[in-house]
Image: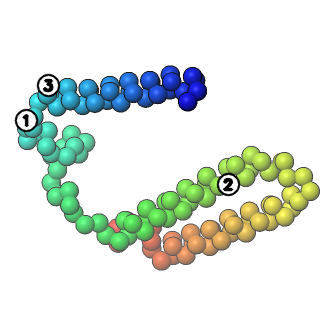
């Protein structure tokens, strides 16, 4: 083993020992009692009025997936827009390709909107 690896192993050893000591001390010194306030979930300062195990409707998950879909579209569109001027010989092809991508997502958005997938009241 080379001499340059010894300091790395020493740091790893001290780090592991530090973590173990801190965990043992917190277990020995820390309090074990939990009050009713400590054990209730925090709900913006208000007392919870429903169980935390309440089932969500499927619409909640559909809207969450739509949010992720359009969030990924934004994450994909920004780097493309930044590097668009660097596409030298085939700018038209890259532009049409992105227009098709946005068009497909727009058609999907209109479909979901017309089907009422974005309405929270239903």
Instruction: Judge left or right: residue 48 versus residue 114.
Output: left
Residue 98 occupies quadrant:
bottom right
Is residue 18 visible in the rendered image? The answer is yes
Q: CA distance from mark 2 to mark 1?
A: 51 Å
x, y percent for residue 58: 35, 71
| Foreground disc of the pair 1, 3 | 3
Q: CA distance from mark 1 to mark 3?
A: 12 Å
Residue drawn at (10%, 34%) of the image? 32
Instruction: Judge left or right: residue 41 versus residue 91.
Output: left
**Residue beneath label 1, please?**
33
Ranked by sequence position, the earlier of labels 2 and 1 is: 1
Residue drawn at (7%, 35%) of the image? 33
x, y percent for residue 116: 45, 74
Q: Which mark is residue 29?
A: 3
| Foreground disc of the pair 2, 3 | 3
Q: What secondary structure is found at the residue carrying circle 1?
A: loop
Return the residue found at the far right. 89
Q: Which mark is residue 19?
A: none
**Residue beneath label 2, please?**
77
Q: Is residue 32 shown above or below 110?
A: above
Residue drawn at (88%, 59%) of the image? 90
Ranked by sequence position, the earlier of labels 2 and 3 is: 3
x, y percent for residue 31: 11, 30
């Amino acid at each position: 083993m080379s001499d340059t690896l010894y300091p790395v192993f020493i740091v790893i050893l001290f780090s592991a020992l530090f973590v173990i000591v801190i965990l043992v001390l917190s277990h020995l010194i820390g309090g074990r009692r939990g009050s009713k306030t400590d054990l209730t979930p925090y709900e913006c300062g208000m007392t919870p009025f429903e169980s935390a195990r309440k089932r969500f409707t499927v619409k909640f998950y559909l809207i969450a997936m739509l949010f992720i879909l359009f969030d990924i579209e934004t994450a994909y569109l920004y780097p493309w827009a930044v590097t668009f001027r660097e596409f030298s010989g085939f700018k038209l092809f890259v532009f049409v390709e992105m227009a098709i991508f946005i068009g497909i997502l727009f058609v999907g958005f209109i479909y979901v909107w017309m089907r009422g997938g974005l309405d929270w009241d239903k």
